[in-house]
Image (cartoon, rainbow, N blue to C red):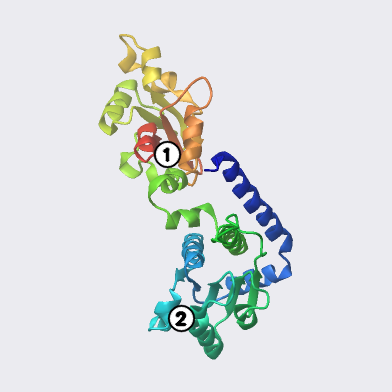
């Protein structure tokens, strides 16, 4: 029995696919720009379709497009021939994947696009294939060697299709001006949702903000700190602008028998760090934990006036890292 070095096999596969990706990048031309522009301006959805491994890739491309602001869905070509063609309208565009470009099951889908004027984008290695000839736009994939040369199992080809789908999604994202805040709308949960949460999503606002006037005494400040339960109180001037805050650390530093009678102005920390409500929560966490002195509360301000208060526990509960 021949001894196989699995590590060498793995490296060979990755290098073959890497070479294929290089060929793919070099092969793209202005036709790609035309496809992005067409998809950017469609009124409907991008319908992704394919059979077998190409179908799996098509499903992933549809999911990536949908999550990045380009409405998309997967339609199985066989199901399309049995009624699901009704899901496709002239306002849509169809992205059909097939390595050979001769996948029989795509026939009805291609004919339907031609009949109703639905734009058809073909993604295939077959430059002279039926899919290529029927397509209004062509994403030609280099016919690079499959990593499993003996069986020709789809490996390199599916990697290239997947990468081309990612390239299409990102190009569309940038062409549409899709932002992190837009992305967050489609990813409210999990690590992505936490990473894209803003201070405004997590902060305490309205009557929950501990605030006191500059003329107050520390006895009043302690009552406000206890009532709001956030471990601090913001100090505002006559115009309602935040000018300082009193924290647990300030209390410890000024502890004495006359603390309750001291003016807030003599105890508070002036010019505390602040952020805007639209600041990413992850950026707020970095501000709170950067430098030698860590802070556990951070005011969000608008026009210098307190809009909310963020506690580090709010960030930890939301899974912000």
- In the image, is residue 267 above or below residue 2? above
Residue 11 numbered tag: none
Residues packed near mark 1 inside 10 Å, few (<14), some (14 to 19) or many (20 plus): many
Left or right: 256 with respect to 31?
left
| Disc ID at residue 320 | 1
**In the depicted structure, whether residue 266 falls above or below residue 37:** above
Residue depicted at x 68% and y 53%: 19
Secondary element under disc 2, as helix, strand or loop, is loop
**What numbered label is drawn on residue 88?**
2
Residue 23 lies, in percent from the top left, at 71, 58
In the picture, measured across the screen, residue 306 lies left or right of residue 159, that is left
Which residue is painted at 42% across and 80% down in the image?
80
Q: SS of the residue at dot 1?
A: loop
Please tell me which residue lies in front, 188 or 15. 15
Report whether residue 91 is seen.
no
Q: Which of marks 2 and 1 is in front?
A: 2
Disc 2 or 1, which lies upstream in sequence? 2
């Amino acid at each position: 029995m021949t001894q196989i070095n699995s590590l060498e096999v793995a490296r060979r596969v990755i290098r073959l696919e890497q070479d294929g990706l290089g060929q793919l990048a070099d092969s793209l031309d202005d036709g790609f720009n035309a496809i992005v522009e067409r998809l950017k301006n469609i009124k409907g959805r991008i319908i992704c379709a394919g059979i077998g491994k190409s179908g799996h890739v098509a499903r992933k491309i549809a999911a990536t497009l949908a999550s990045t602001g380009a409405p998309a869905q997967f339609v199985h070509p066989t199901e399309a021939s049995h009624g699901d063609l009704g899901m496709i309208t002239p306002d849509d565009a169809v992205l059909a994947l097939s390595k050979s470009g001769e996948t029989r099951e795509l026939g009805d889908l291609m004919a339907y696009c031609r009949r109703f004027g639905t734009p058809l984008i073909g993604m295939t290695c077959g430059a002279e294939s039926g899919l290529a000839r029927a397509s209004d736009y062509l994403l030609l994939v280099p016919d690079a060697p499959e990593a499993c040369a003996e069986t020709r199992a789809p490996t390199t080809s599916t990697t290239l299709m997947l990468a081309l789908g990612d390239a299409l999604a990102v190009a569309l994202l940038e062409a549409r001006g899709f932002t992190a805040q837009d992305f967050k709308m489609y990813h409210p949960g999990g690590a992505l949702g936490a990473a894209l949460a803003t201070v405004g999503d997590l902060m305490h606002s309205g009557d929950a903000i501990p605030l006191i006037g500059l003329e107050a005494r520390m006895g009043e400040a302690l009552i406000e700190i206890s009532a709001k339960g956030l471990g601090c109180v913001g100090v505002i001037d006559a115009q309602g602008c935040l000018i300082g805050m009193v924290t647990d650390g300030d209390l410890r530093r000024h502890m004495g028998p006359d603390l309750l009678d001291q003016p807030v102005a003599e105890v508070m920390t002036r010019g505390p760090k602040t952020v805007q409500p639209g600041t990413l929560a992850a950026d707020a966490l970095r501000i709170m934990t950067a430098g030698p002195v860590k802070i556990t509360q951070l005011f969000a301000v608008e026009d210098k006036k307190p809009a909310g208060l963020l506690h580090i526990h709010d960030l930890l509960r939301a899974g912000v890292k």
